Image: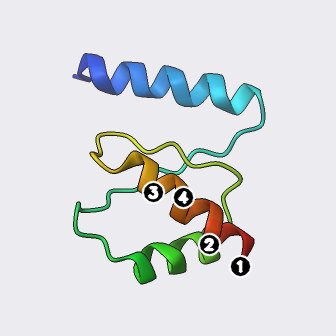
């Protein structure tokens, strides 16, 4: 049986797909090194980044902007 969280996540993914968004779910530890983050950004080339459950959302946003321009 699916949990409420799984049902909500499925509904959100379906909604985003209606708008043509491709959703990738990644788990990164709090100790993810910047050069590894850069490699991930360069590999996936996402248009946007939405940091969740992090104390360093601003830092992740700044790094994302820098790395996505590289």
- Residue 60 - label: 3
Q: Which mark is residue 43?
A: none
Residue 15, compared with residue 41, is above or below; it is above
Residue drawn at x 41%, y 76% is: 34
Between marks 3 and 1, how big is the CA–CA gap? 15 Å
Task: Judge whether 17 appears above or below 59 on screen.
Answer: above
Which residue carries the number 2 mark?
Answer: 67
- Which quadrant holds the C terminus? bottom right
Q: Which residue is mark 4?
A: 62
Q: Position of residue 51 (x, y in %)?
A: 43, 45
Mark 3 / mark 2, whichever is N-terminal: 3
Locate residue 68, reporting x and y percent. Answer: 68, 68
Quarter containing the N terminus: top left
Pick whichever, 26 or 36, lies toward us. Answer: 36
What is the spatial separation of the Cα atoms under label 3 and label 2, in whole angstroms? 10 Å
**Crowd band around label 1 with a 10 angstrom C-alpha radius: few (<14), some (14–19), many (20+):** few
Colour scheme shown: rainbow
Secondary element under disc 4, as helix, strand or loop, is helix
Q: CA distance from mark 1 to mark 2?
A: 5 Å
User: Disc 4 to disc 3, how far (Cα)?
Assistant: 5 Å
**Label 2: which secondary element:** helix
Question: Residue tagged by mark 1?
Answer: 70
Earlier sequence position, callout 1 versus callout 4? 4
- Using a 10 Å C-alpha cutoff, classify the residue at mark 2 as few (fewer than 14 neighbours), some (14 to 19) or many (20 or more): some
> Looking at the picture, how far across and down is residue 56, in whole percent?
33, 51
Separation of marks 1 and 4 at Cα, in angstroms: 13 Å
Disc number lying in front (1 or 4): 4
Marks 4 and 3: CB-CB under 8 Å?
yes
Question: Is the residue 4 above or below the residue 66 in the image?
Answer: above
């Amino acid at each position: 049986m699916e949990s409420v969280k799984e049902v909500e996540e499925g509904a959100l993914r379906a909604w985003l797909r209606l708008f043509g968004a491709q959703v990738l779910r990644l788990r990164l530890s709090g100790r993810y090194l910047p050069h590894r983050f850069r490699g991930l950004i360069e590999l996936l080339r996402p248009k946007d980044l939405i940091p969740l459950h992090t104390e360093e959302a601003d830092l992740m946003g700044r790094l994302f902007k820098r790395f996505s321009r590289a």
